[in-house]
Amino acid sequence: MPDHLVSTLRLLAASLVTLLGIGRVASLWFRELDQQAVAALLLGTVYLITGLGLFGQSRFTVLVAIALCTAVAVLTLVNVAVLTPLQQAGVALDLITVALCSVVAWHAHSKASTSP
C-alpha cells in the first residue's frame, strides 16, 4: 500500500476522532449539566487529545484510538437500549475510525517487520 494512501487514512481518522471529540464537548450546550454531562466532557477531551495525536506520527496514538473508539462503541451498544440517530452516527463514526486506524497500524507493523 502506498505511503501517501496510509497518510490520507490516518488524516481521515484523526479528523473523525477530533470531530467526535468536538461533538461530545459541544453536547454540553444541549443538555442539563449533571454527572453524565461531565463524563461526556471528559470523554470529549480524551477524544480531542487522541485526535491531535493522530495528526502526528506516533504508532501508540493509533493503538489508543483503536482501543478508545472500540470501547466507547461497545459500551454505547451495551448500555443503551434504543439508540437515537445521533448515537447511531457516533457509533458508526467510532467503528469507521477503528477500521481506518487498524489499516494504518497493520501497514506500520508490516513495514517495520520487512525493513532491515
Image (cartoon, rainbow, N blue to C red):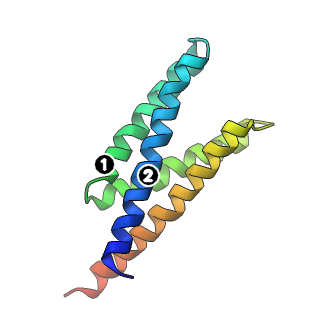
Amino acid type for the residue under numbered disc 2: Ala
90 left or right of 62? right
Say which residue appears at 38% left-offset and 46% top-offset: 51
Q: Position of residue 105 (x, y in %)?
A: 40, 68
17 left or right of 83? left
Can you tell which mark lies on residue 53? Answer: 1
Marks 1 and 2, the one that precedes in the sequence: 1
Q: Say what secondary structure mark 1 lies in.
A: helix
Tally of numbered discs: 2
Q: Which quarter shows the C terminus?
A: bottom left
Q: Position of residue 63 (x, y in %)?
A: 40, 58
Give above or below for 68 relative to 3: above
Q: Quadrant of residue 89?
A: top right
Look at mark 2 in the image and give the residue it sits on. 65
Say which residue appears at 47% left-offset and 56% top-offset: 66
Q: Position of residue 50 (x, y in %)?
A: 37, 45
Q: Which residue of the protein is positioned furthest toward the top in this rendering?
A: 33
- Is disc 1 surrounded by few (<14), some (14 to 19) or many (20+) residues within 10 Å? some
Amino acid type for the residue under numbered disc 1: Gly
Give above or below for 6 relative to 113: above
Can you tell which mark lies on residue 104? Answer: none
Marks 1,2: beta carbons within 8 A: yes
Q: Say what secondary structure mark 2 lies in.
A: helix
Say which residue appears at 31% left-offset and 80% top-offset: 111
- Is disc 2 surrounded by few (<14), some (14 to 19) or many (20+) residues within 10 Å? many
Q: Which residue of the protein is positioned furthest toward the left in this rendering?
A: 116
26 left or right of 51? right
Q: Position of residue 104 (x, y in %)?
A: 40, 68
